[in-house]
């Protein structure tokens, strides 16, 4: 028994249609989906790479900022110490000048006091002689 020819034509048409669909639809669709998947994978890899570079840059920036802060604090501390040293030097110099001025003034005052006592003593002696001369009538 011979199969019906229409079945052969249907099988042949299905095979041709399958071949045509494979070549014209399925392979380009698969290629397009593959390209899209590759593009998505590439974009994800680029995003991860950019994120890791950004993280590294952030870490480097934080380290540089920390180092700069440490340097600024160090400079501020050095300047503070220098200012304290200058302040101490100025205070010591001023104290020495004041002590010198006070000692000079004290010496001068003692000299003036001694001179005033000597004058008073002379004046008292002269006044005493005058009084004695007037009392004695000379």
Image (cartoon, helix red, strand yellow):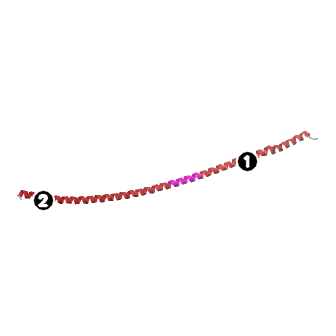
Q: Report the residue marked by disc 1.
A: 35
Residue 11's tag is: none
Question: In the rendered image, which quarter contains the N terminus?
Answer: top right
User: Which of 66 and 126 lies nearest the eye of the viewer?
Assistant: 126
Direction from residue 123 to residue 4 in the image, left or right: right
Residue 126's tag is: 2
Q: What element carries label 2?
A: helix
Q: What element carries label 1?
A: helix
User: Which of 94 and 45 lies nearest the eye of the viewer?
Assistant: 94
Type of secondary structure dominating the magenta stretch: helix
For marks 2 and 1, give the one nearer the viewer.
2
Quadrant of the rendered image containing residue 91: bottom left
| Residues packed near mark 2 inside 10 Å, few (<14), some (14 to 19) or many (20 plus) | few
Instruction: Kindly identify the residue that appears in the image at 25 percent across and 59 percent down.
Output: 108
- Report the magenta residues as a range: 56-69
Count of labels in the image: 2
Query: Percent from the top left, x then y, of residue 30?
Result: 76, 46
Query: Percent from the top left, x then y, of residue 28?
Result: 78, 45
| Residues packed near mark 1 inside 10 Å, few (<14), some (14 to 19) or many (20 plus) | few
Direction from residue 122 to residue 32 in the image, left or right: right
């Amino acid at each position: 028994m011979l199969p019906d020819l229409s079945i052969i034509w249907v099988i042949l048409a299905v095979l041709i249609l399958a071949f045509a669909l494979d070549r014209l639809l399925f392979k380009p669709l698969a290629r397009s989906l593959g390209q899209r998947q590759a593009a998505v994978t590439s974009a994800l890899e680029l995003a991860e790479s950019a994120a890791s570079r950004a993280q590294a840059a952030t870490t480097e920036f934080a380290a540089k900022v920390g180092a700069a802060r440490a340097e600024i604090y160090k400079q501020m501390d050095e300047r503070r110490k220098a200012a304290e040293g200058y302040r101490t030097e100025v205070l010591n110099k001023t104290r020495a000048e004041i002590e010198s001025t006070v000692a000079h003034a004290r010496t001068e005052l003692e000299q003036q006091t001694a001179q005033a006592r000597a004058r008073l003593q002379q004046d008292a002696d002269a006044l005493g002689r005058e009084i004695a001369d007037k009392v004695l009538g000379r």
